[in-house]
């Protein structure tokens, strides 16, 4: 009896191992697939704005823009495209560093009030340019926080640019800041398209890109890296990041930072 029991146990163990190996190789295939898609998308995302900007420069050099107004319009289009490319390159660079385990966070003690007021103010132009209402706190709670302001600015830039991507003209982006126990909490809420329930478990995963945004129905913008970078940075500060969303109604991302 004992003998058959042991054989049975061995079989059960083999079965478990087989399932585990199958799971691991599936995960690997998925990751490889995602990386391939990422490269295709990145080359598209980089080539498109460069081609566009080149075409506008050529048009200007060939004297095809007769008046100042047209020239300004061309400039604005070029600015949008270069901004997008810069953001993409920034994301990729951070991602590469992250892969190498070298995403460095160099925190120092700063006062949250003036720091966040300045950082949040810097996004106003981009938000209003898209025809959205931007609501920021009149005064941000002022406490000492150990943080790397450059990295935190990247977190805010990612969250706000996501909100921009997934909203329509006339929507609102609202930023709220508060102190709760020993945590400084920032919440960024948009009244945009929301996140589909089936996408929710994956948004913080690397390379994950959900439903396409209303502004770019054909080609997905972004790399699917933004939120995983945000999570990394917030957690490196000892904080947490989470979200809540309702399809068709909007999304709210929240992160916390421990107060000194
Ligand atoms: P990317 O923006 O490059 O696709 P992210 O990691 O920043 O990658 O976001 C992952 C996915 O989460 C997005 O593709 C999108 O589907 C969803 N998402 C993130 N922020 C929002 C938002 N504010 N509203 C709706 N969907 C969002």
Image (cartoon, grey):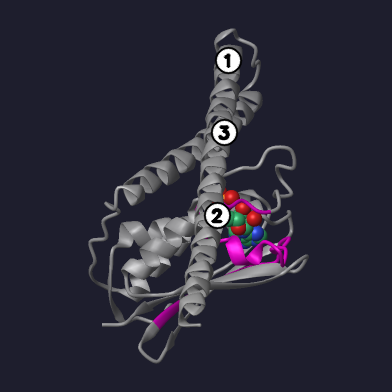
Q: Quadrant of ligand 1?
A: bottom right
Residue lying furthest right in this view? 248
Q: Residues within 10 Å of mark 2 (few under 14, many from 20)?
A: few
The label shown at residue 60 is 1
Q: Label 2, label 3: how many angstroms apart (C-alpha)?
A: 34 Å
Q: Does residue 207 show up?
A: no
Seen at 54% across and 64% down, the residue is 15
Please give left or right for residue 236 compared with residue 228 in the image: left
Seen at 50% across and 63% down, the residue is 14
Q: Earlier in the sequence, mark 3 or mark 1?
A: 3
Q: Quadrant of residue 179?
A: bottom left
Q: Under tag 2, what secondary structure? A: helix
Asked whether 213 or 99 is in front, the reply is: 99
Q: Earlier in the sequence, mark 2 or mark 3?
A: 2
Asked whether 194 or 86 is in front, the reply is: 194
Region of the chain picked out in magenta, as a range: 184-210
Tell which tag, 2 or 3, sits nearer the viewer: 2
Image coords of residue 38 (percent x, y): 54, 39
Identify the residue under disc 3.
45
């Amino acid at each position: 009896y004992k003998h058959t029991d042991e054989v049975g146990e061995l079989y059960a163990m083999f079965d478990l191992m087989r399932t585990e190996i199958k799971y691991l190789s599936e995960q690997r295939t998925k990751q490889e697939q995602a990386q391939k898609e990422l490269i295709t998308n990145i080359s598209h995302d980089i080539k498109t704005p460069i081609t566009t900007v080149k075409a506008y420069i050529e048009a200007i050099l060939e004297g095809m823009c007769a008046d100042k107004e047209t020239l300004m319009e061309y400039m604005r289009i070029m600015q949008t495209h270069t901004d997008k490319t810069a953001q993409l390159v920034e994301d990729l660079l951070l991602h590469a560093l992250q892969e190498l385990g070298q995403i460095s966070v160099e925190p120092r003690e700063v006062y949250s009030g003036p720091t966040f007021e300045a950082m949040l103010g810097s996004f106003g132009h981009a938000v209003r340019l898209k025809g959205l209402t931007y609501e920021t706190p009149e005064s941000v709670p002022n406490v000492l926080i150990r943080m790397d302001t450059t990295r935190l600015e990247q977190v805010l830039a990612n969250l706000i640019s996501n909100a921009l991507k997934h909203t329509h003209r006339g929507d609102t982006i609202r930023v709220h800041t508060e102190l709760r126990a020993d945590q400084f909490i920032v919440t960024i809420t948009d009244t945009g398209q929301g996140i589909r329930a089936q996408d929710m478990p994956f948004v913080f995963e690397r390379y994950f890109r959900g439903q396409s945004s209303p502004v770019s129905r054909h080609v997905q913008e972004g790399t699917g890296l933004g939120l995983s970078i945000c999570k990394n940075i917030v957690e490196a500060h000892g904080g947490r990041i989470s979200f809540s969303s309702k399809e068709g109604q909007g999304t709210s991302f929240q992160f916390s930072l421990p107060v000194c």
